[in-house]
Amino acid sequence: MANPLIVTAPPYLRTGETTHCLMFDVGIASLPIVLASLYFSGPYVILVLFLSLFSALATEGIIQVIKTPGFKLRPFFYNIATNENMTLADGSALVTGLLLAFNLPPRIPFWVPIVGSALAISIGKHLFGGLGHNIFNPALFARAFLVAAWPAHMTSWVAPFEWGQWIHQLSIHPRSWSIDAVSTATPLALMKQQGVSTSWLDLFLGNIGGCIGEVSVLAVLIGAAYLLYKGTITWHIPFPYLGTVVLLTVLFGKDPVFHLFSGGLMLGAFFMATDIVTSPITKRGRILFGAGCGVLTALIRLFGSLPEGVSYSILLMNACTPLIDRYTGGRSKK
Amino acid sequence: MDGFWPTFIRRPQTPPRYAEKTAGQPMTSFLSPRVVTVPLQETPQDVFQCLVKAKDEVAAGQKIGERGAPPFVLSVHASISGTVREIDTLPCPHGNNLTSVVIESDGNTNGCVKVASGRGNIETLLDAGISLDYEKWSGEKIEVLLVNATEFDPYMTVSHQILREKPDHVVKGLKTLMDSFSIPRGHLCVERDQVSSIKALKESAQAVPGVNVHPVPKAYPPAAEPLLLRNLLKQREALVPNRVGTVDVCQLVAVSDAVMQRLPFIERPITVVGSGVSSPQNIRVRIGTTFGEVLTHCGGDLERITQIVMGGGLTGISQHSSSVPVTQKTTGILAMIAFMMTEGHHSKIYERGDCVRCAKCVDCCPVSIQPNLIAAYCEKRRFEEAVQNGLFVCVDCGLCSYVCPARIPLSHMIKTAKSRGDLRTMTSPPGVV
């Protein structure tokens, strides 16, 4: 008699691709963005990224340990190492921390990424039930919170290639956090408030003021090409999104290329809106989702009082995702 | 550890279609097994009659039993010559126990008893033991005979090999069936990339009116044949499924052999692949050869093989023993050696996680349902909503489980829910495909 055979249900083959592969793909795709921001904004960006990632991973770990049944303090490391439901290694906290850091200005006081990532993981994700159950993109949720709570810090930008002036951001003294000496404004704010336009080349390469991840369209496009090639994201969300923005800006007589390249539109379309957890499941629903994001972004930019509307439009459409799934899915979807 | 670490290589959403080693290799033969187990029934409910008893001498091709009620009584043949050892209820690869005749070989592999000549085609087919849906095909008016010659399962190449080696036999068999049951049209679906087979088939089919060869872009699982026909004929409502007969390529060759050369259906080609066999190949074996003997012939070590599957890696049936026989419906054997497994055969690397709504299952579903949604409803025991979302539309192709990055056994959950008796009365709403 040979050894006992394994009897399982079909299929007997698997792709081998796991959830953390999808998450680490986003991490790999954001490498060019990190390098671009390092080039334009200096070494302080690394610190912001590190603090954001560390805070996200620490919050995830703490919540995981608390959620572990029968937790005692003594076998703390044993819990982390052996827990079957350990979600620290699945990479979702890493992606959230990374994307939140991309949404922060390059001269943010050191404590903002820490608070933001902790909020994103705890309230944005685990309060809704953990990975796969959150309604809103955690990074965007935290960004919205930070903008509402500390608008001055979240909207003070630094001119490109101003690598210095960052030591004050590490001080615990609130008066040293202002960056008036080298401050600038984003192209969208310049356009909205003073009617000043920026050249397309500067916008494309990233020679402008703006958040860490959104300045260089080129870097975002390189990362997006990797994600599209790997199949981690599909074209169904970003291209309708960008197409709708172009269509509406042309319709209202504005410069479509300026709106495409400025602000967080590229980052939002390829990295934020395509978040697998908070976007619709069906193909038709994803196209609707992208188009809805585009309409909201264009409306906020052209007619709202805010200069930038990508994060709010994606959050609003995230709220609509269950509705979209319901009306495009189920019976006769394609 | 495949895929555990991120790679820079794109992973396709469908499994690899061909095993490099079996595709295009000429077919080999293994016609001298030591012992065969020939099932007399096809399902445990079949009426059957055994014509031999233990210690009888039988010749290859000799009739040893018959099943079914008149007027369609199907013959069952001994597939090797030898001595009947026992007649018993034995496991069969489809997952049930059937009354089978165990024959020990006497070493003589030459020749076989031919089917009696001088009768009609249908009688010849019944005598040759080819299991077709005679009752339905003769009783109702069948309009279309569909041959799904595509190989949906990864690594299975037996249909392609038959088409490559015997295109004339396939067309001839199809023509014979169409004439015998007076079916006006026959559609033969071949994958588009089988260029040489399509060319040969089209040449053979030119002289035969009514036979159409269709290159189709992708493979369809056997259960999705209505979908295949709908895509093929570009019409939605015109053909009810009752008006369609389906037949498999291997049966067509058997039909052709039975009518032309009076040979009974006692051997068939199968694909033997997997990490457990050292020389994967397409091989002709006698009906009733045990899986263990076939695997040993192909260089498999039964001590090391941990999983044996009848059929391919996506839709096959996992076997609990290597002593089950090859039946007329076995297309192949997949033998695998698992590794990195714990005691209870659970992988420590790939554990089931939460659904992250990545929509890969929805994107790859051939019948456009939402496997993640249906599986979630089934798990919560909300079967009514599962049926409304198309539970019974599922064709059990297994692709959803294949692509799921969270390792959720979607197809298993859907299959389990489908087998519940109390759901049979619920029907899918008309909006579903």
Image: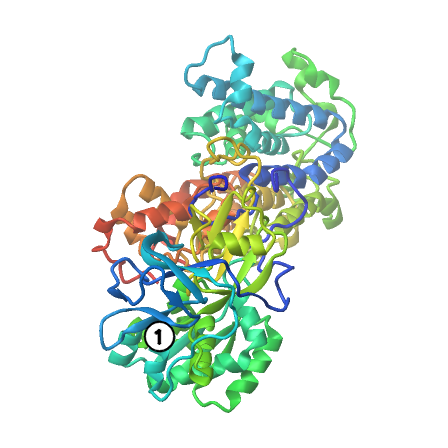
Residue A108 lies, in percent from the top left, at: 65, 24
Work out whether residue B372 can be spotted. no
Label 1 element class:
strand
Name the residue at the top extreme.
Answer: A74
Task: Please tell me which residue lies in front, A147 or B246.
Answer: B246
Work out whether residue A325 can be spotted. yes
Residue B406 lies, in percent from the top left, at: 49, 39
Dot 1 crowding, Cα within 10 Å, few <14, some 14–19, many 20+: some
Q: Residue at x 27, y 43 (%)?
A: B382
Q: Is residue A69 above or below residue B61?
A: above
| Chain letter for mark 1 | B
Q: Residue at x 62, y 26 (%)?
A: A53
Q: Quadrant of the N terminus of chain B?
A: top right
Q: Residue at x 44, y 19 (%)?
A: A68
Callout 1 amino acid: Gly
- Answer with left or right where residue B82 lies relative to residue A223: left
- Answer with left or right where residue B100 lies relative to residue A49: left
Task: Please tell me which residue lies in front, B101 or B385.
Answer: B101
Q: Is residue B220 above or below residue B123?
A: above
Residue B35 lies, in percent from the top left, at: 46, 58
Residue A64 lies, in percent from the top left, at: 49, 22
Task: Please tell me which residue lies in front, A180 or B183.
Answer: B183
**Mark 1 sits on what residue?**
B245
Q: Quadrant of the C terminus of chain B?
A: bottom left
- Answer with left or right where residue B295 lies relative to residue B262: right
Q: Residue at x 42, y 35 (%)?
A: A133
The tally of labels here is: 1
- Figure colour scheme: rainbow
Task: Please tell me which residue lies in front, B157 or A95.
Answer: B157
